[in-house]
Image (tube, rainbow, N blue to C red):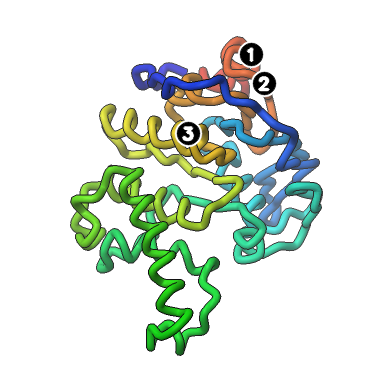
Amino acid sequence: MSNTTPAVVAPIGAQKKIGDIILDVKNISLGFGGVKALTDISFNVREHEVRAIIGPNGAGKSSMLNCINGVYTPQQGSITFRGQAFKHMDSHQVAVMGIGRTFQNLALFKGMSVLDNIMSGRNLKIKSNILLQALRIGPAEREEIMHREAVERIIDFLEIQAFRKTPVGQLPYGLQKRVDLGRALAMEPQVLLLDEPMAGMNVEEKQDMCRFVLEVNEEFGTTIVLIEHDMGVVMDISDRVVVLDYGKKIGDGTPEEVRNNPDVISAYLGTSH
């Protein structure tokens, strides 16, 4: 567990208040043919917390996120969001409920501008039909102005004002990751799933992204579920950590509890199997 980034200092402010359980994962099992990706996984996420999911490569972390946001349908178990249990939900339905997602591999529109990419995250909020949007008349024009104002606030928050009209494909990787985060924020999610948001970044880019994740959590009140390999990041910004290994849960608790868990230490040192 030696892959670390220098500590990131959280923004100064009042101690945040962790709320009740907002997302409850119970006994999730997922398989592909004869291969078990997840076996009887249970954990919960509390409102306003940063909840990390960690584990070695192939542990089932991304598969777990894919179950939460409807990409995969588990064979067993249930997921409850704000008291509503669901087993067979697609990604669109999950997004409408208030769960947003970024992906490990960027899926941005490389030829479109930063502003237009983030604007695409507002689609679920747009009420006007396509014809009215194209003509930009009446309520549709007022609605577009409102959504663009929301996007501009996100651009300011992420400190990418200078690139707002730049095609995303021309930006450095670290800035593309910010745009991906901005598009997810444009949905105004209650829970935001982040799949390795610091992957491929240098130390400075990681520190910037950590700062933005903390500010999203603290200033916007967004609950964060985070997959990350950098243990320095995980231990520094997470409220609680769940640990997977070979599709099974081997640890769950505060960063300090997980850090000292013999099963977690063994898994990361490669001596558990």
Q: Which residue is mark 3?
A: 228
Q: Which amino acid type is shown beneath numbered disc 3? A: Glu
Q: CA distance from mark 3 to mark 2?
A: 16 Å
Q: Is 127 displayed left or right of 136 in the figure?
A: right
Q: Quadrant of the C terminus?
A: top right
Q: Earlier in the sequence, mark 1 or mark 3?
A: 3
Q: Secondary structure at mark 3?
A: loop
User: Which residue is found at the position 26% from the left and 29% from the top?
Assistant: 204
Residue 113, image quadrant: bottom left
Residue at the spot 38% in from the left edge and 50% down from the top edge: 154
Circle number at residue 253: 2
SS of the residue under disc 1? helix
Residue at (80% x, 53% y) in the render? 84
Look at label 2 and name its amino acid.
Gly
Residue 215: mark in rendering: none
Q: Are marks 1 and 2 in contact (CB under 8 Å)?
A: yes
- Give me the disc on residue 257: 1
